[in-house]
Each structure stands twice: as structure tokens, then as C-alpha cells.
Image (tube, rainbow, N blue to C red):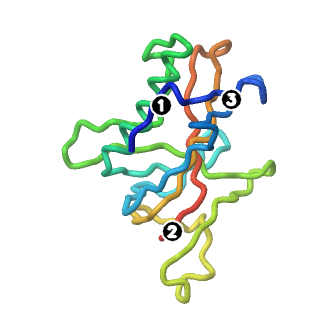
């Protein structure tokens, strides 16, 4: 996965603290296959968070390249950019991507969940996602949040669109 930072477009006209981001005028979507969800679903600041352990270094570099392009465009120091990647120094673990689950305005999760095989798991919900679950995810880099006025920080919003277990 290669990305040319010059082809990134950030649309600042939508909301005050949230900008949409596009690559070649398309929403940025990509699959992460055979990854591990070590912690299950977490609730942070009334948002559902999924931390995905990623073994594919190309995906990590892809996200970091987008973050670097945002830092250059807005002249941010490293301390001003809140990264979606948590690097690990321990050889035993892989880097973690921090993603949000897609929700509606009532904070109900809209992320599509499919189980394999469907016959034995057809009544399970996303809230039953257990720790250390292996999954395939379709991720979307849906935007950039900008809280420079209040906290002097910016960051990417990575949303989970689909989960296949």
C-alpha cells in the first residue's frame, strides 16, 4: 500500500472541529485481515473503541504517512498530533491501531458484523466481542479532528465499517 501525500484532500468546510479526508477524491478504505482484537470493545469518552493488533507493517506505514502529511500541512509538532498507532517495543506484541466503531446520533453501533460460520453465531451482537478474538476488518479513515484551540492537538479518525469473525 503506497500513498502519495500530495493527493490527499482535506475538506474543512463541513464542521468546525472535524474535517473530511479523501485520497484522489475517494474515501480511504482498506481491509486488515487476520488481525487480533486483544481487549474487546472499550468505551472511552462515550465512544466505542476497538484496538486492533496489526501484523502488516505496510498498513501501519500507510496510516503513519497520512498522519505525517497532516502534520506537514498544518505545521504540527509530533506532540500536537495524536496518533492512531500505538507502537510497542516488546517483541512479543505487534503495533495497535485504535479505531472507533461507527455509531448513529443515539450512540447505537452501526458497524456491520458477520460471523463465520453464521449458523452457530447468528444471534450474537457486536457487544459480545470477546478479548483475543481473531477478525478481518474494513477500516475507513473518515476524517481529522482538530482541537488545536482547546488542547493544541489534532488526529485521524479511523472507523470500523465491517467486521468478519
Q: Which residue is mark 3?
A: 19
Q: Quadrant of residue 150?
A: top right
* Residue receiving disc 2: 164
**Alpha carbon of mark 1 to alpha carbon of mark 3: how far?**
14 Å
Decide which of 140, 41 is in the foreground and name it. 140
Question: Crowding near pointer 2: few (<14 within 10 Å), some, many (20+)?
Answer: some
Q: Is residue 162 above or below residue 147?
A: below
**Label 1 vs 3, first from the N-terminus:** 3
Q: Is the Cβ of the residue at disc 1 closer than 8 Å to that at disc 3?
A: no
Horizontal arrangement in the rendering, residue 121 relative to residue 103 (left or right): left
Looking at the picture, how far across and down is residue 51, in whole percent?
Answer: 46, 49
Residue at image point 59% right, 47% down: 159
Callout 1: helix, strand or loop?
helix
CB atoms of marks 1 and 2 within 8 Å: no
For this orientation, the residue located farthest to the left is 91
Judge by depth and name the residue closer to the eye, 52 or 139.
139
- Give residue 154's position: percent from left, percent from top: 57, 23
Look at the numbered discs 2 and 3 and tell me whether their residues touch, using CB distance below 8 Å.
no
Amino acid at each position: 500500500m503506497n500513498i502519495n501525500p500530495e493527493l490527499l484532500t482535506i475538506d474543512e468546510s463541513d464542521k468546525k472541529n472535524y474535517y473530511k479526508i479523501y485520497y484522489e477524491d475517494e474515501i480511504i478504505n482498506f481491509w486488515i485481515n487476520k488481525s487480533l482484537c486483544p481487549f474487546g470493545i472499550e468505551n472511552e469518552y462515550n465512544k466505542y473503541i476497538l484496538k486492533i493488533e496489526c501484523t502488516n507493517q505496510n498498513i501501519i506505514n500507510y496510516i503513519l504517512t497520512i498522519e505525517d502529511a497532516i502534520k506537514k500541512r498544518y505545521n504540527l509538532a509530533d506532540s500536537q498530533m495524536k496518533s492512531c498507532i500505538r507502537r510497542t517495543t516488546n517483541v512479543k506484541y505487534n503495533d495497535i491501531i485504535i479505531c472507533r466503531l461507527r455509531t448513529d446520533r443515539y450512540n447505537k453501533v452501526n458497524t456491520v458484523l458477520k460471523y463465520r460460520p453464521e449458523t452457530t453465531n447468528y444471534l450474537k451482537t457486536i457487544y459480545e466481542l470477546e478479548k483475543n478474538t481473531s477478525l478481518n476488518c474494513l477500516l475507513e479513515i473518515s476524517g481529522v479532528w482538530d482541537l488545536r484551540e482547546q488542547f493544541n492537538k489534532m488526529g485521524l479518525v479511523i472507523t470500523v465499517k465491517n467486521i468478519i469473525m
